[in-house]
Amino acid sequence: MENKNLTEPLLSKWIATGVVGGSDYKIVKRNKDCMIIEKFTGKTYTYHAMNFITREYQYLFHKKQPIQDTMDILLDKKLSVLDFYGRHFPKSGEEMVRFIFEIVFTNYGYGIRKEQIQLSLHMYQMMTTGNISLSDVPVGLGKTHAYLVAAIVQRLYSGIEIHRETPVIITTSSIELQRAIVKDYLPEISQMLLQFGIIDKPITSVIRKGKDNYLCDFRLRDYIKNIDPKKKKLEELIILRQVESLNEIDLDELKGISQYDKKRICVNYNSCQVCLQKNICRYQQFMKRAKQSSINFQVCNHNYYLADVLRRKRNLSALLPNHKIVVIDEAHKLIDAARQMYGASISQRNLYNLANKAIPKKLNTTKARQFKETAEEVIKDSNKLFAELVTNIPEHINRDETEKFETILTSKSRVYLSRIISYLQDLIRFDHGEDNKYLSDLKRCIKELRVFQDWGIIYWMEQPFLKGQGVLASIPIALSKVLGEDLWSTDDSKLLTSGTLAVHKDFSYIKKELGMQVAFENRIHQVTKESPFDHKENCLLYIPENLPYPSYIDKQYLIEIGNKIEALVKASNGHALVLFTSYKPLKIVFEHLKPRLKAYELVQMKRGKKDSVNEFKKAKNGVYFATGSAWEGMDIPGDALSHLIVVKLPFPIPDPISEYERTMYASMDDYINAVVVPQMLIKLKQGIGRLIRKETDTGVISILDARATKGAKYHEAVLQALPDYTVVDSTLEIEQFLREKKKKEYFE
Ligand code: SF4
């Protein structure tokens, strides 16, 4: 649904009935399906009641003076005796869900989507019965409105007090969606429901984040006080000073502050414990308000939600207020968040920083010298540990494609690990004054290191070839079992939704990953929805014959595929996103095509360069060579993206996690069918979902992988996983299709 103008549509409807003319009317009361309108005739104020569904109306009374707020009860009484009062007002939660979509939203110009209403009704039912829902909902159906309406209605109608009085938790993967829910969706729905008298107070919500995302008043003042003006840009200093008096303390919302500065002014909880400003600082005030259960919606990311789950499990104070309903949007990302939150990691840089920070400036005492020696031992052993881990990375691993590098914790590495732990423990014993943060960092690091002494983990290395930046990471072997116990064995209602949860309407893959077999099968309810867009009419799927078999290490293959891309880009006059599965072939093909596609604005995605997508958005007939996050994080409605070219089917890259998972299956084929193919199809759906973002979008999808061509192994699986497109195999048809669908300017 799009944003609509929220001026008084009911009032204009009233006027449109012709019962009263003119424009100086005011709605003074709404109750159920009726409202009272005040009109000043020049001498007196007249009051009419009207049922805004049936348009029945009745004169009530007139007065010399306008009525006051104190007459509210009297007005309610006047309405309640009318024949047409409340006749069409929803009596049950289900009726209210329908009422909101069919009557309220349509009053503000929204269309009715039966599928969306059914989804919302399903979600409402799951919330009221304390069940678990898995819903696969394509872009454009309006799942956010569906669950927000369901949640609001369950609060209004629930017979269970705790459901009415505890907040609903919404967790998402992206901050953009969290912002949209709190700043756009909920305020708009709130205003509409208030105008209809469905709620009597605005809906409240808050975004919850980790403490280091917020500003600490004490650290800010201290930082500004100690800044050397000669070493700081004047404009940066001005912004920091301005921040002191703003209402905003969310660092993501404070523009113009560098990451460097943010690290120095963010909340550091250890300082809070001894802070004298505890009762008055803006962060503590914010937290007090945010934790109130009177706030209807608590919105956070998956990591924050899982941190809350883990804290409750360990009997630590919870981050979120008690709740009975959790909506997990973008739920396909929950497993990644779980791997981070339940996993452990140690980085070479972190060990270096911890040790380096411990080295005293003055070495005039024996203790200080010992301190220095211990810290240096940490650095030495850490370097040896990471060097050993790099040595143990098998030769065959494709360095360009993988992010998780298999390695072996040999007995030698384990000796280094033990020594580092013991040296860090020695560092704890030294006097650190009041630096509580340093002490807690040391303790946390020891805790993470100890995880790697355990055998019940899957571990790997990240960034092994970036000097001094190596990371050793792990997850528990039994992660899905643990998740099952922590997330699904409670009686809370949980709603997982996303555009890519199911494969061929089957949720087995995600259920297994998230350990959902623990939840009683009868508690899990599954829903898949068809896309509301007319893909057959608005989209072509191009899968040519005679493609070379994909091999990124084969130069000839890359040249052939590059030539294919060249022809496709010309057929759609640019406006294309070329999706690769890794950076190296992307770079080779980009370089190959640069001199041949001079008529187009070519944009290359590079590691760490975040704004390349904006260059593409601004380009007139751009071609964006991308990989990684472009498979799922891009939203470019309109003509800028009209051709999506998938170079290779996005099969998962083998890594230590998948290697372990493979051992859980009787045969390689079983594993491929149960895990590898579903993962590939989910990612393919995510990638292809970049193209049609709105009802009016039109475009072409080209798949250049020989394994997807007619008669090849994955042809049918690919077609079944995607919406019903018209399939073609010639570039001429692409050109013809786009000439039919696009305006003349598109080809200029
Ligand atoms: S209580 Fe914590 S957040 Fe607030 S000013 Fe003190 S240290 Fe900063």
Image (cartoon, grey):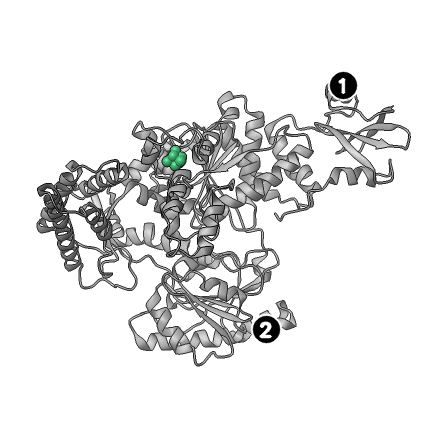
In the depicted view, which residue is nearer to us: 523 or 166?
166
Task: Say what amino acid the circle numbered 2 marks.
Answer: Gln
Residue toward you, 115 or 407: 407
Q: Position of residue 370 (x, y in %)?
A: 10, 44
Numbered mark located on residue 250 in the image: none
Q: Would residue 89 be found to the left or right of residue 170 on screen?
A: right
Residue drawn where x is 39% and y is 48% of the image: 262
Q: Position of residue 212 (x, y in %)?
A: 38, 42
Query: Callout 1: 10 Å neighbours few (<14), some, many (20+)?
Result: few
Residue at the location (63% across, 70% down)?
740
Q: Is residue 69 above or below residue 710?
A: above
Query: What residue is shown with label 2?
Result: 736
Q: Quadrant of the C terminus?
A: bottom right
Q: Position of residue 356 (x, y in %)?
A: 20, 49
Earlier residue among tags 1 and 2:
1
Q: Quadrant of residue 716?
A: bottom left
Viewer can see residue 642: no
Q: Residue furthest bottom?
A: 595
- Ligand 1 occupies quarter: top left
Q: Secondary structure at mark 1?
A: helix
Quarter of the rendering containing residue 15: top right
Residue 463 makes an appearance in the image: yes
User: According to the image, label 1 marks what residue?
Assistant: 74
Q: Label 1 sits on what residue type?
A: Leu
